[in-house]
Image (cartoon, grey):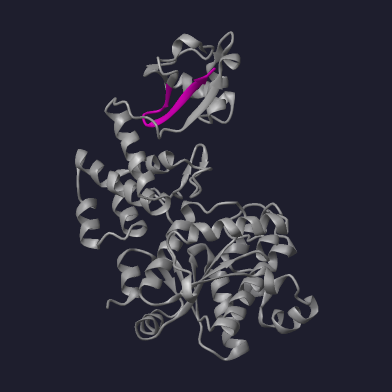
Amino acid sequence: MKNVYDILMERGFIEQATHEEEIRELLGKERVTFYIGFDPTADSLHVGHLLQMIAMTHMQKAGHIPIALIGGGTAMVGDPSGKSEMRMMLSQEQIENNARKFKKQFEKLIDFSDDKAIMVNNADWLLDLNYISFLRDIGKHFSVNRMLTAECYKQRLETGLTFLEFNYMLMQSYDFLQLYRKYGCRLQMGGNDQWSNIIGGVELIRKVEGAEAYGLTFTLLTTSEGKKMGKTEAGAIWLDPEKTSCYDFYQYWRNVDDKDVEKCLSLLTFLPMEEVRRLGSLEGAEINKAKEILAFELTKMIHGEEEAKKAEAAAKALFYNGSDISSVPSTDITLKELEGGMGILELLMLTGLTSSKSEGRRLIQQGGIYVRDMRVDDIDFKIYEHDFDDNKNLLIRKGKKVYHLVKLQQ
């Protein structure tokens, strides 16, 4: 069986490793317990988490044991990594609710039965810590001078780094120590922005326990231009269909840039690499077939095959002017709301196609809004009952590929 380290390397996951040869050898000869942390700062995981979930799945398929660590304790402090300002504080109730929803999303990819994977919450050990004992036992192993050279802190020094956030590295390092003691966890994995925190945990285990521990980071999911993927004008692409519809999820992947197709297929699907390279090498109109496969595979993985088929059919129906638009995101409005006509700017906000009237004005002035496939040029344009078809539907398009159905109710 191929070493999972080589699989992750070939597919483009691995960015940095504390001890590359030792980690590869360990993964090749032993069943390794490893962990990845997830801060429950929202009530759904998003596309940025997907790469880490898939890496966990590759590891589990190779016989290793994933720990999904929910940062119920660390979320009450906030990770300064990659942030220009302090995060909003969440209550324990919010964190616990978010963690429950995460578990359901993890289970789409990771098998938690019979302890094949573990989910734990660091609130279990962080919330009851004795601060003085923690400083004496853990804090003494950390050099402030060295911590200040870490990228996650350096970039915050200019805008202001709170002492609360300064504790984050110690807390995450302590997580690794606790997981080592309780589960024999020897490897922490995470996004490349977690490198400094991961090194902190590796060194803490070596100092306190005299044991070998390792860290490995993944590439961040970015476009060929270096921008983070999973963001749109409307916000993040969520894994919860209540926050990002299955259709919008499918369309996001269907519309990725040609240059990003092979990378996405490699990192986010389980297609064999020969097929990934074949699809990624397609050119011209042919590359659209690869995008359809990418969109279908990801939608099936997260939302199930039936929803993936619906989203695919809806996308093709719109593209070919077909009639099956049942899976296109929709908004209901009543005849009473439409009385006297509804302004296009108001309708765009009601459907969520824009977040403000000023954004709607800009899109219309740029020629980016279409009603019934006719471009809207007037910001004062109004929608009336007679604009709806016989089925009481009205199709609005934003740009080339974002569709929304408005349904008229009596």
Does residue 261 appear in the picture of this structure? yes
As for residue 104 lying within the magenta part, the answer is no
Where in the figure is residue 99, as x and y percent of width and height?
A: 60, 59
Q: Residue at x 37, y 80 (%)?
A: 24
Residue 233 vertical placement versus 144 (above, below)? above
- Quarter of the view holding residue 404: top left
Residue sitting farthest toward the front:
410
Residue 1 vertical placement versus 366 (above, below)? below
Where in the figure is residue 200, as x and y percent of width and height?
A: 58, 76
Q: State the quadrant of the C terminus.
A: top right
Q: Residue at x 49, y 11 (%)?
A: 385
Does residue 215 appear in the picture of this structure? no
Residue 88 vertical placement versus 256 (above, below)? below
Along the viewing direction, whichever of 20 and 354 lies nearer the viewer = 354
- Quarter of the view holding residue 204: bottom right
As for residue 406 lying within the magenta part, the answer is yes
Exactly how many numbered labels are in the figure?
0
Residue sitting farthest toward the bottom:
210
Residue 37 vertical placement versus 281 (above, below)? below
Along the horizontal axis of the image, is 118 left or right of 11? Answer: right
Along the viewing direction, whichever of 193 and 236 lies nearer the viewer = 236
What is the chief secondary structure element of the magenta stretch?
strand
Where in the figure is residue 58, as x and y percent of width and height?
A: 37, 68
Where in the figure is residue 220, as x and y percent of width and height?
A: 44, 58
Q: Residue at x 32, y 26 (%)?
A: 323
Q: Residue at x 37, y 31 (%)?
A: 401
Along the horizontal axis of the image, is 320 left or right of 236? Answer: left
Q: State the quadrant of the N terminus.
A: bottom left
User: Which region shows up in magenta?
Assistant: 395-410
